[in-house]
Image: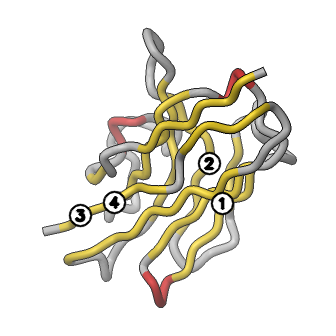
Amino acid sequence: QVQLVDSGGGSVQTGGSLRLSCVASGNTDNFYIMGWFRQAPGKERVAVARIYIGSKNMYYADSVKGRFTISQDNAKKTLYLQMNSLKPEDTAMYYCAADKSSYPRGGSWLAAPSYSYWGQGTQVTVSS
């Protein structure tokens, strides 16, 4: 059984920073990929960043490039998302996700259906 627990969200003003954490527990030894998604009210869940486990191969959505950094601490089984220069449009529920397959079932690692395991979400609110 795998469990992902997200934390670190909060309310900040424009230009502020937050660091999200995702702690994995259970049978996580053969995770292939982990990522962060976000979902604003009334909108679909979209990929923010992803990283292959044990790799420096990372992806960032254009909207967060240069401001967000995804990183992993395999010893702590923790995924991070450092978010700087936050904007009101970054306001959303942020979710950690992971999968063990080397093939994205949803057709792309940017697609939410490609991930089998999800955190409960952590809310990020950025005020102007």
Question: Label 4's element?
Answer: strand
Which residue is at the far bottom? 75
Q: Residue at x 45, y 27 (%)?
A: 45
Q: Residue at x 47, y 13 (%)?
A: 43
Which residue is at the far top? 42
The mark closer to the camera, 1 or 4, is 4
For residue 19, side relative to residue 122 (left or right): right
- How busy is the neighbourhood of tag 3: few (under 14 within 10 Å), some, or many (20 plus)? some
Label 4 is placed on what type of residue?
Answer: Val
Disc ID at residue 10:
none
Q: State the residue in front, 31 or 103.
A: 31
Q: Quadrant location of the N terminus?
A: bottom left
Percent x, y for residue 73? 55, 80
Disc ID at residue 49:
2
- How busy is the neighbourhood of tag 4: few (under 14 within 10 Å), some, or many (20 plus)? some
Which residue position is annotated with label 1?
70
Label 2 is placed on what type of residue?
Answer: Ala
Label 3 is placed on what type of residue?
Answer: Gln
**Inter-mark Cα distance, 2 to 4:** 17 Å
Picture layout, residue 76 above or below residue 69 = below
Disc ID at residue 3:
3
Q: Quadrant of residue 126?
A: top right
Of marks 2 and 1, which one's residue comes earlier in the chain? 2
Q: Do labels 4 and 3 touch, CB within 8 Å?
A: yes
**Inter-mark Cα distance, 1 to 4:** 16 Å
Which residue position is annotated with label 4?
5
Of marks 1 and 3, which one's residue comes earlier in the chain? 3
Q: Residue at x 60, y 31 (%)?
A: 125
Of marks 1 and 4, which one's residue comes earlier in the chain? 4
The mark closer to the camera, 4 or 3, is 4
**Inter-mark Cα distance, 2 to 3:** 20 Å
Percent x, y for residue 65? 81, 43
